[in-house]
Image: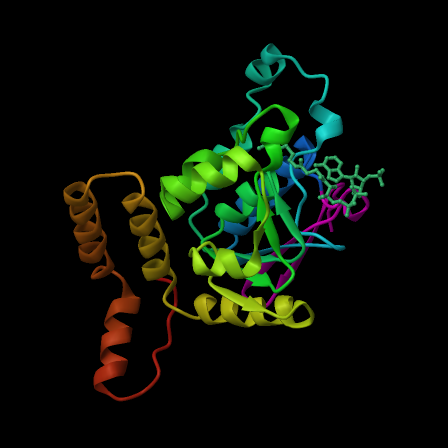
Amino acid sequence: SKSYEAIEVSQHGKLGLIALNRPKVLNAINRSMVSEILDTMEEFEADSSIKAIVLCGKGRAFAAGADIDEMANDQTIDFELRNQFKDWDRLAMIKKPIIGAVHGFALGGGFELALCCDLLFAADNAEFGFPEVNLGVMPGAGGTQRLTKLVGKTKAMEWLFTGKRITAKEALQHGIVNQLISEELLLEETIKAAEQIANQAPIAIRLIKEAVLKAADTSLNEGMEFERKNFYLLFSTEDQKEGMKAFIEKRKPQFKGK
Ligand code: CAA
C-alpha cells in the first residue's frame, strides 16, 4: 500500500477512511496534507467498491488550522503562483458523500475542512472557530462563505471578528453539526452512520448531494429546475426500478449503484 506523510488511509467495507495524521502539531494542515487528502478522495471517487468517505483526525484534535509555520514567510505572489487553494476546489468536486468526525479543535482551515463535509458528527469536546483574525489574516479556504451560508451573517460576523471558539453544543444549536457523540464512541458511531448512507442507492445519494449543494449557490427557481432534472434522471437507473418494486413486494431493496 501507498505511504503518506500527513494522513492515514484505510478501507472499511464500503467506506473509505481518511485520518489526518500530524498529531504532534494538532494536525495542522500543510500543503502536502491537502494534496494527499484530495489524491485519496479522488481514488475513492474512482473506486466503485467505496460508497462514502469518512474524515477524522488522529491525536487530540481534528485539525488546529492551516500550518502557520509553513506560511508565516509567504508573500502574496507565492499564494498566487502556486494557486494555494486549488486542492480545495478539487474537494468541492467530490460527488460521494463525505462524513466528518470532529473531536477537539477544528480551527481555521480545520473548521473549513469540517464545513466541506456533507454530514458532521462531533465529540462533546469539539471546539470550532476561526482564529485567523488573531494572526492578522482571515480564512482563505471558504470559511467566510460557507459559514455565512450555513448560519447567517449575524453569528458568522461575530465569530470571524472575534476568533472566539464555538463549543460543540453551540455548533449543534446552529446547525453546524448533525449530532454530538461522546469522544470514545465518535468514530464508531460516525462509521455506523456512514455505513447506512453507503447502503442507500448510490446514484440517488449522488444526485441528492449535488442538488443540496446547488441550493447554496443558486436561486430557488434555478435550483428547483436542477432538482427536477436530477429526479427525472433517477428513473433511468436500475436502482429506482428495484427500490419501487421492493416496496410493492414488501421486501428490502438490493441496490447496485446502476
Ligand atoms: N500550525 C502550526 N503548528 C500548530 C498549529 C498550526 N495551526 N496549531 C498547533 N500547532 C502546534 C503548536 O505550535 C505546538 O507545537 P510545539 O509542540 O512544537 O510547540 C503543537 O501544535 C501543540 O499545540 P499547543 O502546544 O499550542 O497546544 P495547546 O493545547 O496549548 O493549544 C491551540 C491548542 C489553541 C489550538 C493552539 O495550538 C493554537 O492556537 N493553534 C493555532 C490555531 C490557529 O490560529 N489556526 C488558524 C490557522 S490560519 C488558517 O487556518 C488560515 C486558512 O484559513 C487557510
> Residue 239 occupies which quadrant of the picture?
bottom left
Q: Residue 96: horizontal and vertical position, in percent? A: 45, 53
Name the residue rendered at 63%, 14% in the picture. Answer: 78
Seen as rendered, the residue at the extreme right is 24
Looking at the image, is 55 positioned above or below residue 70? below
Looking at the image, is 168 positioned above or below residue 183? above
Q: Residue 63: horizontal and vertical position, in percent? A: 66, 46
Name the residue rendered at 18%, 50% in the picture. Answer: 229
Its colouring scheme is: rainbow
Name the residue rendered at 57%, 39% in the picture. Answer: 130
Q: Taking 228 as reference, is 47 left or right?
A: right
Name the residue rendered at 36%, 42% in the picture. Answer: 149
Q: Nearer the viewer, residue 97 or 242?
A: 97
Report whether residue 49 is seen: no
Q: Taking 169 as reference, is 238 left or right?
A: left
Magenta-colored stretch includes residue 25: yes
Give the magenta range: 1-27
Looking at the image, is 211 positioned above or below residue 191? above
Q: Nearer the viewer, residue 151 or 19?
A: 151
